[in-house]
Amino acid sequence: MMSKNVIGVDMGGTKILSAVIGPEGNILGTAKVPTKADKGPSVVIDRIADSIRKAIRKSGVAAESIQAVGIGAPGPLDPATGVVIFAPNLRWKNVRLKEELEARVNFPTFVDNDVNVGTLGEHVFGAGQGFQNIVGIFVGTGIGGGIILQGELFHGASKTAGEIGHIIVKAGGPRCGCGTRGCLEALASRTAMTKEFQKAILKKNKKSIISELTGGDLGAIRSGVLAKAVRSNDALTLKIFKRVTKYLGIGIGSIVNFLNPEMIVLGGGVVEALDDTFLDDIRAAAEKYALPNTLSGVQIVPAKLGDNAGILGAAALARQRIFND
Amino acid sequence: MMSKNVIGVDMGGTKILSAVIGPEGNILGTAKVPTKADKGPSVVIDRIADSIRKAIRKSGVAAESIQAVGIGAPGPLDPATGVVIFAPNLRWKNVRLKEELEARVNFPTFVDNDVNVGTLGEHVFGAGQGFQNIVGIFVGTGIGGGIILQGELFHGASKTAGEIGHIIVKAGGPRCGCGTRGCLEALASRTAMTKEFQKAILKKNKKSIISELTGGDLGAIRSGVLAKAVRSNDALTLKIFKRVTKYLGIGIGSIVNFLNPEMIVLGGGVVEALDDTFLDDIRAAAEKYALPNTLSGVQIVPAKLGDNAGILGAAALARQRIFND
């Protein structure tokens, strides 16, 4: 019998990563190409098709062994039709990604939101194996998330379920990118941390190794820089992370009180930048805000797939939609 | 063929209401008895059994037409085993309600939390008919809720899902009965409103018709009194309701951003006390806090079953568990 391989595509604003993924989540071959979003959707989709063909060549498997393609794409999209409704970083509006790619590669193609796909990847191949009700929280520039219920992605009535960054944890709190105030994202994302660093260093003249590590450019502090600052026990960085921990704890407490999932998987650049004690701190914070006994059945764990979350999650999507597993 | 009737039991701290419910949610006969919780669980369960027999007699249907009993009970409980883990208002701890009642009435018996059952009732017989993913929010002394996913109650890993009163909407906000701060219940329940009235009337000497309507006893302001004050356009009452509306809007906004259900059903004494414009205000507030397009698929509607929510919800539970409908 032909082995059941699938393609996972992680589609970002600057690069496209495609991979041939075996049944156990083994990565058999990958190809990375620049997205070139400025050339328009048609060229980008050509490039996806090329990267898929390259990945197959590099894997050495027969093209006939490929059963489906999964794509994690940015922006609000319709997972049923595979239409990307709006993706500002690609300058896409209503692009029929599924249909257009199927016309080019002749494999059944399935599309879902990148954070949904990341959460599904953890369920099928990562930290969430064996758990059926999972909330994924990914902390980076923003805070995204996905919800797995009864082993499947839950999309909700408007296909927007999982916008964990926009639960309101502090009414009247800091302004969020979405226009309202006090969203989790406005308090615990890297963007929120950056604002805190700017305030402390530029306005209050606080000393921090961050000034040195960023060469004074506090416009966009990368997760790697944060990790270094934590490892050097920089007081300001630790203080700002303490605040992030508190608000993530509140957000998780709310989710536990409301949905009471079996597992919360925490990932993304900011989480990856930190060591395990950070997770202990988040757990302790969540415990303060969750009702008694509600956390007893809930695991809070770090994501396992790291940089491969995108391709493995997309592969998990393809597998689930075509094999129903 | 024998018609498929069930019994719905609404079990409260002071009274037990039992009813024979026909297939379309028609109430065929009811019986109400005092709970007498002070006499201990065994006597209370005897009284439930008595009320069931009375309701059957009054309905005129044959006992053989009864297929099952559903009970909405207070407190954390295990819906699988029917054990009430803890119910302070009954002074119950680990009471095997299902088993004990089955020994007395010889009908298969199913037990669930009273707010869960209220939400299920709206799904099967009330405002949520035809909708599969529903969040019920009941605003009274506290704020309780239930979650229906794919047409069934969602209990979560620790059987505590739906504690909507304890999502944190204002970190560092007013102290909640649960011990933490800023829960929705601490900002938008009748208890929260009562505190606001006390502060305004007793400490700040504000004038309000509430003083008159309660005879000066601001210890526990009933929903009926609130309704009267609203109808007389009492400025302080309207101001306090405006605050409740805002925080309910924030809570609903968070739920819509996170879970994106098809429908949010609002019930409970505080909601019933008000007219439809209040619901419009809540919708408008939710719109402010929900992300663009997330509310497009979400209905926000008032509960329909009112005082019968308990018995009809319990009947819906019995029907769903025994007929799988």
Image (cartoon, coloured by chain):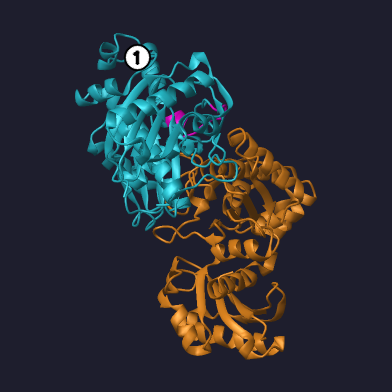
Chain colours: A cyan, B orange
Q: Residue visible at 50% across and 89% down?
A: B104
Q: Nearer the viewer, residue A209 or A89?
A: A89
Q: Is residue B164 visible?
A: yes
Using the rendered view, name the quadrant where residue A244 is placed.
Answer: top left
Was residue A181 drawn as part of the magenta stretch in this picture? yes
Residue in the picture at 35% in, 48% down = A287
Q: Position of residue B316 (x, y in %)?
A: 60, 70
Query: Up-down: is A265 above or below A204?
Result: below
Span shown in magenta: A178-187
A173 w.r.t. A315: above or below:
above
Q: Amino acid at mark 1?
A: Ile
Percent from the top left, x then y, of residue A305? 30, 37
Instruction: Give the image location of residue A94, x and y in percent.
Output: 60, 28
Q: Quadrant of residue A121?
A: top left
Could you say which is closer to the camera, residue A196 or residue B206?
Answer: A196
Majority SS type along the magenta span: loop
The residue lying at 41 percent from left, 45 percent from top is A135
Can residue B180 be seen here?
no
Identify the residue under disc 1: A201
